[in-house]
Amino acid sequence: MPPTKSRLILASNSASRKAMLESVGIAFEAMPSGVDEAAIKSGFSGPPAALATALAKAKAGAIATRHPDALVIGSDQLLVCGGDIYDKPRNLAEAAQHLQALSGRTHELVTAVCLMQAGETAWLHVARVTLSMRNLSDAFLQQYLTAEGDALLHCVGAYRLEGLGAQLFTSIEGDYFTVLGLPLLALLGALRARGVLLV
């Protein structure tokens, strides 16, 4: 049976999420949700997985409301270290502060992804990855920040594993795609189950 012609929308302008979907040949549109993430985070009490889920559903819901015919992908990722949740750095100085705080420590990425249609959540998945960062010297950190530049401002943790960020770590336990911001294999399975992709 051929796949259905459901309109698929990614509720994000994330370059890494778009690249992942494009690389596996999925036809989709990308739209920023316009959700005020800071407002959701400030009024939230609960575990990181619940917060990531709330953010993913809010993003998908904002687009699904405007496009009820579409199947909408919403996703969000949080970095948790020592009980603290890190946001994307606002500038390179803050990126340096984040990396200094994470240096020599183990942290967790919690990533939620959902599919929503006509205001209803059709599927939800939460994935976790544990990453151990090596001790970073000041010289390496300066070289890294100079090389990566403003690209780091779009990444929670101030690293891109698909780039020089791989040099930061001694070990990673979990799914590579989840580190990049989208549990791609689980999402592909959900799309196949709904007839969007061929089985």
Image: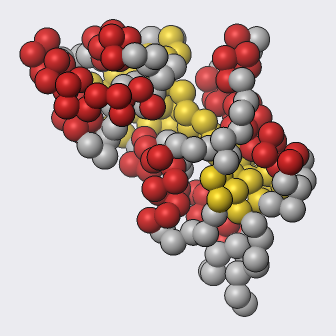
Expressed as whole percent of the image width and height from the top left, the position of residue 55 reads: 70, 31
Q: Is residue 140 left or right of residue 128?
A: left
In percent of the image, x 33 and y 17: which residue is there?
Answer: 92
In the depicted structure, whether residue 43 falls above or below residue 49: above
Nearer to us in this view, 158 or 101: 158
Expressed as whole percent of the image width and height from the top left, the position of residue 117 reads: 84, 55
Residue 98 can be seen in this image: no
Q: Give the color scheme: rainbow, by chain, secondary structure or one colour.
A: secondary structure
In percent of the image, x 39 and y 48: which residue is there?
Answer: 176
Residue 73 can be seen in this image: yes
Nearer to us in this view, 85 or 5: 5
Nearer to us in this view, 127 or 22: 22
Q: Quadrant of the C terminus?
A: bottom right
In the depicted structure, whether residue 168 falls above or below residue 45: below
Expressed as whole percent of the image width and height from the top left, the position of residue 1 reads: 72, 90
In percent of the image, x 52 and y 60: which residue is there?
Answer: 21
In the depicted structure, whether residue 88 falls above or below residue 65: above
In which quadrant of the rendered view does residue 127 lie? top right
**Name of the residue lying farthest toward the bottom:** 1
In which quadrant of the rendered view does residue 142 lie? top left
In percent of the image, x 26 and y 32: which residue is there?
Answer: 148
